[in-house]
Amino acid sequence: MQRDMDRRDLLKGVGVTGTMLLAGCTGDGGDGGDGGEDSDGNDTGGDTGNETGNETDGSGGGGADREEAIKVGTLLPTTGDLGDLGKPIEDGATLPAKQLEGETDVQIDLRSEDSQTDPSAAQSAAQSLVNAGYPAITGAASSEVTIQVAQGVTINNGIAQCSPASTSPAITDLDDSGLVYRTPPTDALQGEVLAQVARERIEAESAATMFVNNSYGQLLSESFASAFEEGGGTVSQQVSFQKEQSSYTSRIEQAVSDDPDVMIAIGYPASGNQLFRDFYANFDQDLPILITDGLRDPALPSNVDNPMENVRGTAPLAAGPGTDFFNQLYQEEYGREPGVFTAQAYDATACLILANAAAGENTGSAIAEQMTNVANEGGDTYTPENLADAVAAAANGDEINYQGASSAVEFDENGDLTAATYELFGFTEDSESDTGYAIETIEEIEFSA
C-alpha cells in the first residue's frame, strides 16, 4: 500500500581497463574498538547550508582526457554500536567502484576507513583520508559522527562529504560551505511519518519516547513529539539513554510511568539488545512500540530472545529507479540481501564519483559543486545499471541526471533529499535466515517535500 503525505514546515530555513584500489579498514585511526559515547550537543554552526555548492550551473568542464584516478573514501562503522549495520552499508558504498572496475577509461581509487561509531575515532580516520589525498568521503553513518567529522575535518579541508545514513535535522543547517550532502531523508520527515503511524495504525492518543543521547536520537524524538502533538496527541515523557549500558530498566520505567498508548524507541542495535531484554523481562509486553531505522536489525529478536510481535518501525525505503538492479548486483557480489541504508550508500558513492568525473579533478569543492548537476533533473537519465556510461558522459562534460538505487536522488539547496519513500516494517520468523527472523515490509509511505 502507498500513501501520499504533505510535508509540514519542520525544516529551517569511465577502452583501457580501469583499476579499483581498495585499502582496508585499518590505517590511521581505523583500528577498530568498541566506540565511545556520542555527545548530545547540537551546536552545528550557522544556517548557510549548501548554497555555495549548489549555485554552479552547467555540468562543469568534465575530464574525458584525465589520467589521474577518481579518488573517493568511505568512512563507515564496522565496529562500535553501529558495527552490525555498518559493514553491509560499507559494502554498499564500495559496490560502485567494484562495478566500474574494468568498465571505464578512468581508474577508481577507493579507500575505506572505520568510523567505530565514535566521533573522535572517526575524525582521526577522516583526517587520514584527507592526508592521503582523498577529496570526497562517503560517510559517516551516525548523525553525531557525521556532524563532528564535518565540523572537525571535512569543511576546514574543503572535502566533499555525502552521508548514506545520517538523518538528523541538525545536518540541514550546518555551515558547511556547500560540502555536505546526504542520500537518506532528514528525520524532520521521519518524525511526521512516525506520528502518522502512531495516530492512524495504533490509534494512540498518548505517547512516550526513549532516545539515544545524541543528535540523531534527540532531534528525531523532538520531531516526532512536535508532529504528534500538532495532530492532537500528548507526549508525556521524552527519556534519553546512553549507549551500551548494562541496564535500561530505570529509563524504561520513567518512559512508561504515565501509561502511554505507544512508546517510541530510537537507538542502535548494541544498545537495543539490552533495552528490549529489560523491557520484556519487566514490563507489559503488549505495549505497542515503534522503532526507527537505527534498530532495523533482523538479528534483534533472536538477540533479545523474543519475537517482538508488539514492535513495528519506520525507515527510509530503497525505492529508486535502480533498486532492482542494485539488489541483484549486491546479492551477486556479497551473497546476501541488501539491508538498511545499503542502497543509499551505493548512491552516495556513485554521486561522488560522477561529480568528480564532471569536475575533472580531485578537488573537494569542485566535486561538491557538481553534486546537484549530476543528480538533479536535466540532461540524459542514467541509473545504476548504466553507471559506467554515466561516468563517461560526465567526464565528457555532458549533462546527466543520475537516478539511483534508493531514490531519484534530487538534492535541495541544503544537500537534503526533496522526496523519499518510507517503509513501515515488522519482524517475522524466517527459518532460512541465520538469525531465525527477517524484516517484513508492511506498508510503503511516500513523502514529498
Image (cartoon, rainbow, N blue to C red):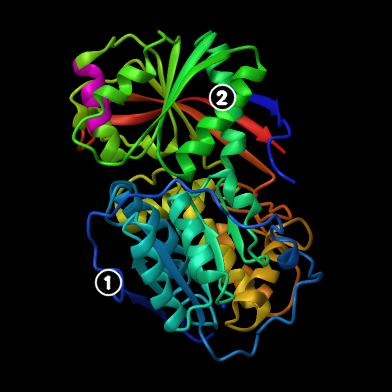
Label 1 Cα crowd, 10 Å radius (few <14 / some 14-19 / many 20+): some
Residue 405 left/right relative to 336? right
Residue 407 visible at all: yes
Q: Is residue 272 or residue 388 the one in the foreground? A: 272
Residue 290 spot, x, y in % from top left = 43, 23
- Label 1 sits on residue: 26
Which quadrant is the N terminus positioned in? top right
Image quadrant of residue 309?
Answer: top left
Q: Is residue 94 left or right of residue 63?
A: left
Expressed as whole percent of the image width and height from the top left, the position of residue 165 reads: 48, 49
Q: Which residues are magenta?
A: 274-281
Q: Nearer the viewer, residue 382 or 164?
A: 164
Q: Residue at x 44, y 71 (%)?
A: 73
**Residue type, label 2:** Ala
Which residue is at 54% across, 82% downward? 106
| Nearer to the camera, 325 or 184 | 184
Q: Which residue is mark 2?
A: 225
Q: Is residue 35 above or below residue 379?
A: above
